Image (cartoon, grey):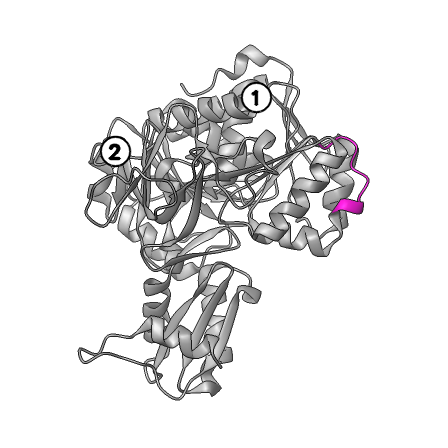
Amino acid sequence: MMWTFERFGQRIALLDEKGQALSYARLAEEGAALMRAVGGRRLVFGLCRNELGSVAGYAGMVNAGAVPLLLPDGIDAQLLSTLYQTYRPAFLWAPEDFAWEGCQEAHRALGYRLLRTPFGDETALHDDLALLLTTSGSTGSPKLVRQSYRNIEANTRSIVQYLRLDENERPITTLPMNYTYCLSILNSHLWVGATILVAHSGIAQRSFWDFFRREGATSFGGVPYTYEMLDRMRFTRMDLPSLRTMTQAGGRLAPELHARFVDWCERTGRQFIVMYGQCEATARMAYLPWEMSAKKIGSMGVAIPGGRLELVGVDGQPVQEAGVVGELRYYGDNVTLGYAQCAADLALGDERHGVLDTGDMAMRDEDGYYTIVGRKKRFLKLFGNRVNLDEAERLIKAAFPDCDVAVGGRDDHLTLYAVQGGELPAMREYLSQKTGLPVSGFFTQEVAAIPKNEAGKTLYRELEEIHDGR
């Protein structure tokens, strides 16, 4: 059992914008009722919204041995169908307005329905497997991250320790709950008996801030795009007397923006804490202690309690000197079991053995603080979501087979390059729909030709140099 909800009794665990609340005792009861309907250790697809039923279902399943795959409720239908046929879940836990052919209702609670599929116990699950999350698979791949009970507990304990969390916290959700960063906020605050304010509205809506003030939110977390929006909204002029802590992860925050929020927090007696993580490490691997925020602008900090970081050079040996770039490697109990790409992979055990090569390039300063300087492979983050550029490119080429197209970019700025410029607006809309990410993160550029080498491989660096130099 991950959490012992009964020990917090009638304390409020979850509270939503409509004023609906679940105590910890009720959370335990709802989880038990759901698991009686599931009937044991089975694979369940959870279609997530930031709502009480979604959070309660997740917590109940992890606590009692079912294995949820958490997906956004607005997931592309084709991708959901691919995942469904690939992994063959026993049940779907979905909002009441969700329908899926060939399923029968087995349980209903808190605005959600448990739908029994025809697959039954077809998919075998390893004893250590607790949770499945998508990674860059938002672009169409069925690739999943396999998280264990040990992973979740280790990362939860570490987060509770370095953020000094207790039952007096009242965090408000700002990100989708199926996103690993938001999930780590849920896990850690449920661990200490805090009250989580489950906001369905986004930070651009007045109802979010009304809820925030009415219920006295003490903290929130955001990705770089969140803080860019807050900056445009003149957030620092808001009257939010209950706010104590702001956390940031999901990509590197622009140093100037980092500095502005740190300055405001220091002037107003609040804490701004930058963190670093990946789904492959459950959630978090490093953090910048708030006391060092002003001194280490742009840094991701040091390893979380129980973890260890090192840099690896091109020769495969650890980098000992300060100021030298290497690939970031992490060691810890929160390093996940590995990936899954088919149902048979869910029966696999630990393939990483506590070691993760992150694919990020970083430097360590004289004080032992790390700063990310780039990525080894073709990934970027859009609104905190990790996107594989190669998969995005394959998706576009499949949908627009007559176009010469390439995909590049940087965090929060994915660029579509095409010789046929007239198709670019449609490509942009298509990729936004397929990934479920806002169209504002996708940019387009018409080019005379896509530069390629003799083997026909795209020269992405040359392509981006052409774009940057235009």
Q: Which mark is residue 130?
A: none
Q: Is residue 427 above or below residue 93?
A: below
Q: Which residue is mark 2?
A: 125
Q: State the residue in front, 143 or 122.
A: 143
Q: Which residues are magenta?
A: 236-243
**Would you call the spot at circle 2 few (<14 residues within 10 Å), some (14-19), or many (20 or more)?**
many
Based on the displayed image, in which of its 4 quarters is residue 96 positioned?
top right
Q: Give the distance between the C-alpha atoms of the residues marked 2 and 1, in whole angstroms.
A: 35 Å
- Dominant secondary structure of the residues highlighted in magenta in the image: loop
In the rendered structure, does residue 287 fall within the stretch colored magenta? no
Residue 35 locus on image (x, y percent): 42, 26
Based on the displayed image, in which of its 4 quarters is residue 42 positioned?
top left
Local secondary structure at mark 1: loop
Viewed as shown, does residue 148 lie left or right of 369? left
Q: State the residue in front, 112 or 228.
A: 228
> Is residue 468 visible in this depiction of the protein?
yes
In the rendered structure, does residue 237 fall within the stretch colored magenta? yes
Residue 101 locus on image (x, y percent): 40, 53
Select label 2 or label 1 by which is in front: 1
Residue 20 locus on image (x, y percent): 69, 32
| N-terminal-most mark, 2 or 1 | 2
Give the residue type that dot 2 points to: Leu
Q: Is residue 460 above or below residue 294?
A: below
Q: Which mark is residue 164?
A: 1
Residue 53 locus on image (x, y percent): 56, 35
Residue drawn at x 26%, y 36% as measured from the top left: 121
Q: How many marks?
A: 2
Q: State the residue in front, 323 or 303.
A: 323
